[in-house]
């Protein structure tokens, strides 16, 4: 595409060589004369002056003399839109690999792609345009919507419901038993894990994450939520829409999470916690069982507390050595 064509697509305001051909996207420091990149923020714009990129997406009002640019409202989002056109995904050929095992009563849309060694059990439904990578397992009665991608070795336990345009990366497990036991008569007795799990539309789940089914209720992952690699979500958890959950986070059973919540890496959430809408939780924070985190809060630390309070605590801890020396000096004076 030419720079002018990209500007019209986004849309944006071009400057420089409008007829220059752009064939791909790349990072700012690696982009060549036929590639598109982006720059936002003072440091990136300063660096962009010497970039070899054929075209740069910049914020509205920014000027880079000598560079070909397209001014847009959100450069990073604009790059995503351009990349979708410049690097279109190659749809897999529809059909069922000869090594796949498919139950006779399974209902697959005609254009579904089923990879090698996939196992599809009785009662499964798979919507149009969905791709099942090698080694995927769909248990009895699973429903998978349209235009989904299940990468190799995804395991979906019986009865799970998956919406449209869901991406499950390699090794994801959906619908495994929750970790629930009752200690009685000198042993741990397994509590029934008979509930369901629902993954709504436009969810993406990273590699080797695990999501348990409800024990007697339902685990729900809300529309548009994005979950990183190596995340554990326990039974009966309900996650709202458009949340971000970063790697190595663990969410205990019966947690209720609102919409637009962001959790940093290695966050731990105790059981029966309620997290309201638009909460931000800093990395490695620990939220104690039963706690309610109010809408719009930003919390950090273990046990978690408001960000301003946590920063004050850390600042005081940083001064403990100085305080200890002062106490020792005072003690020596008193001894004299």
Image (spheres, helix red, strand yellow):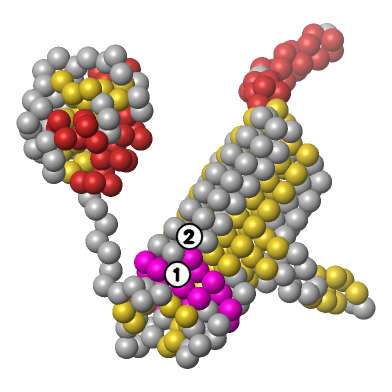
Extent of the magenta region: 125-145
Which residue appears at 68% of the width and 68% of the height?
196
Which residue appears at 52% of the width and 84% of the height?
121
How far is the residue under mark 2 from the one under mark 1? 8 Å
Q: Is residue 167 left or right of residue 47?
A: right
Tag of residue 263? none
User: Can residue 18 be seen at all in this image of the molecule?
Assistant: yes
Where, quadrant-wise, is the N terminus in this rendering?
top left
Q: Is residue 128 magenta?
A: yes
Q: Tag 1's secondary structure?
A: loop
Q: Is residue 98 left or right of residue 285?
A: left
What residue did someone put label 1 on?
Answer: 127
- Check whether the beta carbons of the residues at disc 2 and disc 1 lie within 8 A of each other: yes
How far across and down, in percent of the image, does residue 275 sit? Answer: 71, 41
How far across and down, in percent of the image, does residue 68 sit? Answer: 14, 24
User: Can residue 234 be seen at all in this image of the molecule?
Assistant: no
What residue did someone put label 2 on?
Answer: 164
Q: Tag 2's secondary structure?
A: loop
How far across and down, in percent of the image, does residue 152 sit? Answer: 40, 71
The quarter holding residue 6 reads top left
Q: Is residue 61 left or right of residue 216?
A: left
């Amino acid at each position: 595409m030419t720079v002018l064509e990209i500007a019209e697509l986004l849309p944006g305001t071009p400057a420089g060589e409008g007829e220059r051909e752009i064939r791909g996207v790349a990072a700012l420091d690696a982009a060549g004369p036929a590639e598109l990149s982006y720059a936002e923020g003072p440091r990136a714009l300063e660096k962009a002056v010497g970039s070899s990129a054929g075209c740069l997406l910049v914020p509205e009002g920014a000027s880079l003399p000598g560079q070909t640019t397209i001014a847009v409202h959100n450069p990073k989002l604009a790059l995503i839109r351009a990349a979708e056109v410049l690097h279109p995904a190659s749809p897999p050929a529809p059909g069922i690999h000869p090594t796949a095992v498919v139950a006779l009563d399974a209902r697959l849309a005609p254009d579904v792609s089923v990879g090698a060694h996939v196992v599809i059990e009785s009662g499964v439904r798979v919507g149009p345009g969905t791709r099942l990578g090698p080694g995927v397992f769909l248990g009895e009665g699973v429903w998978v919507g349209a235009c989904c991608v299940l990468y190799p070795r995804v395991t979906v336990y019986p009865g799970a419901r998956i919406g449209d345009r869901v991406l499950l990366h390699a090794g994801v497990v959906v619908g495994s038993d929750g970790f629930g036991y009752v200690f009685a008569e000198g042993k741990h007795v397994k509590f029934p894990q008979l509930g369901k799990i629902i993954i709504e539309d436009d969810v993406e789940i990273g590699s080797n994450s695990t999501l348990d089914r409800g024990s007697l209720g339902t685990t729900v992952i809300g529309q548009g939520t994005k979950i990183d690699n190596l995340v554990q979500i326990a039974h009966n958890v309900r996650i709202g829409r458009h949340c971000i959950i970063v790697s190595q986070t663990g969410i205990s059973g019966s947690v209720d999470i609102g919409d637009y919540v962001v959790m940093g890496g290695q966050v731990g959430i105790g059981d029966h916690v309620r997290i309201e809408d638009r909460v931000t939780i800093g990395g490695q924070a620990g939220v104690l069982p039963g706690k309610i985190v109010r809408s719009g809060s930003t919390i950090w630390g273990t046990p978690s507390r408001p960000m301003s309070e946590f920063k004050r605590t850390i600042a005081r801890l940083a001064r403990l050595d100085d305080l200890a020396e002062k106490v020792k000096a005072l003690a020596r004076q008193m001894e004299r």
